[in-house]
Image: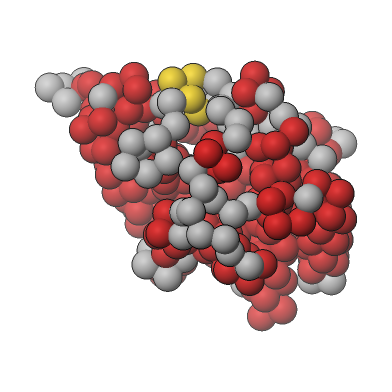
Amino acid sequence: MNFKEEYQAAQALAEQELGGCFLAKGPHKELLDAMRYSLLAGGKRVRPVLALKFCEALCGDMEPALDYACGIEMLHTYSLIHDDLPCMDNDSLRRGKPTCHVKYGEWLALLAGDALQAAAFERLALSSRTSPKANAKACGILASAAGRHNMCAGQYLDIVEEGHTLDEERVTQIHLRKTSALLGAACLLGLTASPEEPFERQWTAALDYARELGLAFQIRDDMLDVESTAEELGKPIGSDANNGKTTFAALYGLDKCRELVAEHTRLAKQSAAGAFEHPEFLCALADSLAQRKS
């Protein structure tokens, strides 16, 4: 298969599994509907694909990582629901659809995000595709990426620094926490799910890959917020500038940002190529994300 076919196969595997989630009936059905609404709203499924393909890069099979892939997408979706809330970024559109709080109301969106976060850890902890020891390690990996030192800290800094002019180091630190940390968790979850034990250099390479991929991803995101359209992105453009946030695009301009995306992508590919026998998909994924239009 070529890269596009491989990506679509991994994406479809995750999509099918996610489609069976939160279908129970009961007096709380509207809560489950709100969870499914955001979870199944589309998107590239980059994080579950990373988990699946890092597992495959190690053991030749994606299946062991499927529960972990679903769990990290649930957690990512919770973060998007909360990110869009009026008390955060106050966005009304996500992936071309009304955000969860616009469709269901603020209090129900908040609960849907909370429930998705809990479901993410439940999915990891109870996976029968992997060992209890691996599941415990996976929960620790995801908690570290999502918690007080990484994703939540990044969101805190992102909001508290609104209206301030930040330097390169501060902006980078925000996005290493907000973006790279969860991508890193996806990669490490794939390695953790594998029945074949990774070497130490593969753990390190996975984190290096995710760090560089996350920075390239965020810089490209900031560029698209300037040069794309709401129709292409599926969400409002210019919201960062409107909220008084310092972005990579504001710091460097678009031409320099293109150079930085290329360099971080090169470093991500270098990390994967130096540690895995078959890094072709991981390298092609880095290139694909660097060139994305949405």
- 271 vs 11, left or right, is right
- Quarter of the N terminus within the rendering: top right
Q: Where is residue 218 in the image (x, y as percent from the top left)?
A: 66, 51
Where residue 37 appears, x then y in whole percent?
39, 24
The percent position of residue 5, horizontal first and vertical second, equals 79, 32
122 horizontally vs 83: left or right: left
Q: Is residue 1 among what the camera can see?
A: yes
Could you tell me which residue is drawn at 43 percent across and 26 percent down? 92
Q: Which residue lies furthest to the left in this view?
A: 27
Q: How many numbered discs, if any?
A: 0
Residue projecting furthest to the bottom: 200
Vertical comparison of 4 with 253: above or below: above
Q: In which quarter of the image is residue 60?
A: bottom right
In this view, 131 is above or below 71:
below
Q: Which of 79 and 126 is in front in this view?
A: 79
Identify the residue at image location x=58%, y=47%: 47
Q: Is residue 120 above or below residue 203?
A: above
Residue at horizontal 49 percent and vertical 33 percent from the top:
17
Displayed quadrant of residue 95: top right
Name the image quarter holding the C terminus.
Answer: top right
Q: Which residue occupies the foreground of this view, 123 or 294?
A: 294
Q: Where is residue 202 in the image (x, y as percent from the top left)?
A: 70, 72
**Side of 234 relative to 252 (left or right):** left
Q: Which residue is drawn at 49% across and 43% down?
A: 243
Q: Say if 229 sits above or below 78 in the image.
A: above
> In the depicted view, which residue is nearer to us: 253 or 200?
253
Question: In the depicted view, which residue is nearer to us: 119 or 154?
Answer: 154
